[in-house]
Amino acid sequence: MRTPAYLEQYQNQYKQNPRQAALAWFRDAKFGMFIHYGLYSLLGRGEWAQQIEKIPVAEYAGLKEKFTAEKFKADDFASLALDSGMKYINLTTRHHDSFCLFNTKTTDFNSVQSPAGRDLVEEMANACAKKKLGFFCYVSYGADWRHPYFHSRDIGSPSARPDYSSPQPEYLYREKADFRHYIDYVHEQIKELLTNYGPIAGIWLDLIVDYYLAPDFYPVEDTYALVRKLQPQCMISFKQGATGTEDFAAPERQGKSLAERLVEMKAAARSVEIARKAWESNKN
């Protein structure tokens, strides 16, 4: 089993236990680059523009025809990271808007089938490999503003869908069983990311609040098992944590449990307890 370039200093440990080698590397790494990039970059108003501004699904999708990625320079990003003392790069392979930066068979809503005609994940993975940087794949798991079978706003987090004033014809979700189409879609994309782009340092999942509010919708254990099976060294992060078995916590803004926030949202006691227990396991 060949040691990934970013783990070459942990080669002996990798031969014994790939996951423990990766954890040791990450503890030492400390500093990395997080790149948010996608159709929203054309608007220049942040990755939440579709949600905040309630841009209709069809209108937002039209941005794909303007996406050239002419300023996306993977080698330059990798060089900047290395020169700055960083040890890894994390790229939004698919954010909440559902636009994919890689060559996926699951949808034509991707960078390869845009005017850019490029697989940006491949470019970034190759650039990181050349510089011996770890490459993380951010994947939106708990929100999708385009997929027809992601659930409605009244089931989980308000972030699940934009609060449109009129029904969007693209949204076909009617019952819980429909959500399985979305899970199959996400799992297939994770398979693609972990099969087609060499060693991946980690899968960085997001949005945790929706999982807390609708835990029965998400087969998190199956998702984690898929990652572990395909690439044993690949770490898993899902914000504060879903099961407490994640490799590290990655909270935003505040390094604490979201239990209090869930209480304020009048979430079920079970949701609050899931959040509390996961954070207790992951916070250190």
Image (cartoon, rainbow, N blue to C red):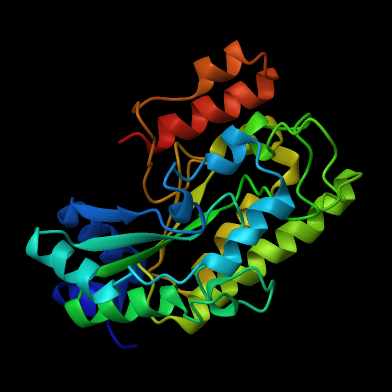
Quarter of the rendering occupied by the N terminus: bottom left
Farthest-out residue, front: 66
- The residue under the point 43% across, 54% down is 41
Farthest-out residue, right: 174
Pinpoint residue 118: horizontal percent, then vertical percent.
47, 80
Pinpoint residue 36: horizontal percent, then vertical percent.
39, 53
- Residue nearer the viewer, 107 or 238: 107
Quarter of the rendering occupied by the C terminus: top left
Pinpoint residue 252: horizontal percent, then vertical percent.
38, 34
* 7 lies left or right of 252: left
| Count of residue discs | 0
- The residue under the point 64% across, 26% down is 271
- The residue under the point 45% across, 74% down is 231
In this orientation, does residue 141 appear?
yes
Pinpoint residue 147: horizontal percent, then vertical percent.
73, 55
- Residue nearer the viewer, 75 or 188: 75
Farthest-out residue, bottom: 2
- Please say if 40 is above or below 73: above
Q: Quadrant of residue 5?
A: bottom left
- Residue nearer the viewer, 251 or 36: 36
* 237 lies left or right of 192: left
- The residue under the point 18% across, 77% down is 131
- Please say if 183 is above or below 12: above
In this orientation, does residue 99 appear?
no
* 45 lies left or right of 13: right
